[in-house]
Amino acid sequence: MQQNAETRTVQTRTAQARPGEPRTAEPMQLYLQDARKYQYLTPEQELDLAVRWHDHQDQAALDKLIGSHLRLVVKMARGYLGYGLPLADLVAEGNVGVMQAAQKFDPAKGFRFATYASWWVRAAIQEYVLHNWSLVKIGTTAGQKKLFFSLRRLKARMQELESGDLSPEAVESIATELNVSKTEVVEMNRRLGNDRSLNVGLSEEGDAEWQDLLADERPDQETTLADSEERRRRQQFLKLGLGVLDDRERRILVARRLRDEPLTLEELSQTFHVSRERVRQLEVRAFEKLQKAVIATAKTEQVAIEKNRLLTNA
């Protein structure tokens, strides 16, 4: 970007005082002092500067065009103070937006630069808020971003600001108005509670922390062992069932039903030099034989388990 605009942005971030100005001045004070040096533009002046920059790359015109809209950036940035981010950072991001707008603006289309720049400033500030307001990713789609920046306003209108989870009626109303799903409304409302450390103590007296109340969603040892045993039994049954098939039946069944990417009937017909219909018939017959073998094995095992139980109880 251009040197003058870049210099203002850097000074906003680093709070470097200019020669002759107090060293103790706040960054925003320096920024506002700089902004007040530029007068508001009439539509004719704005158009003239925009044309000079767009057609002739006039750096002085660009400086005046951007400088005259610095107060617009501050005004828009103040609208996002409710998200707890520093005003100086919001303004710095808005500066980026107004400079991008100057680079993209085409005066021949007949729009005011201030109107065009407002969209770029708002987009830059909102993107910054979304990336810095929470450690958790807030939203990626246009609908989720709109929901994030509109939810508080709609909750205030419905007098739901302090109600925790929204009422079903409020969820449905907000989802309809913003054209998002009810699930997205509920999830976004819970995220807007801000991040909280899991290491925060439950009380000042004890050592318990919030993380101590989290339920462990992992399966317990008994469930893990049972699942492992069940997988082992199924693999054993499958192995025994495949053993009753001849080589061609086994290869076709594996290729059609036990591969991550099954082969087509056409591919197998070329491999075995038979028609696709014949391959399909062999597949069906192989599956039926496998199914019968697995069921018979399971029944035999169940009988053996029942006998052992009776002998144990005798």
Image (cartoon, grey):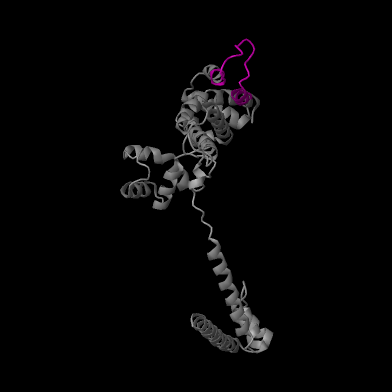
Residue 74 in picture, x, y percent from top left:
49, 26
Report the number of numbered marks.
0
Q: Quadrant of the N terminus?
A: top right
Left or right, residue 237 beside residue 272:
left
Residue 51 in picture, x, y percent from top left:
56, 29
Q: Is residue 264 visible?
A: no
Is 21 a magenta residue? yes
Give the residue furthest to the front. Answer: 314
Residue 253 in picture, x, y percent from top left:
61, 82
**Region rendered in magenta:** 7-30
Above or below 110: residue 247: below
Above or below 92: residue 245: below
Left or right, residue 236 beside residue 46:
right
Comparing 194 with 301, the one in front is: 301
Is 162 a magenta residue? no
Residue 26 in picture, x, y percent from top left:
56, 18
Q: Residue at x 51, y 54 (%)?
A: 216
Left or right, residue 194 beside residue 271:
left
Comparing 112 with 171, the one in front is: 171
Above or below 164: residue 72: above
Comparing 118 with 184, the one in front is: 184
Give the residue furthest to the top. Answer: 20
Q: Is residue 213 visible?
A: yes
Quadrant housing residue 190? top left
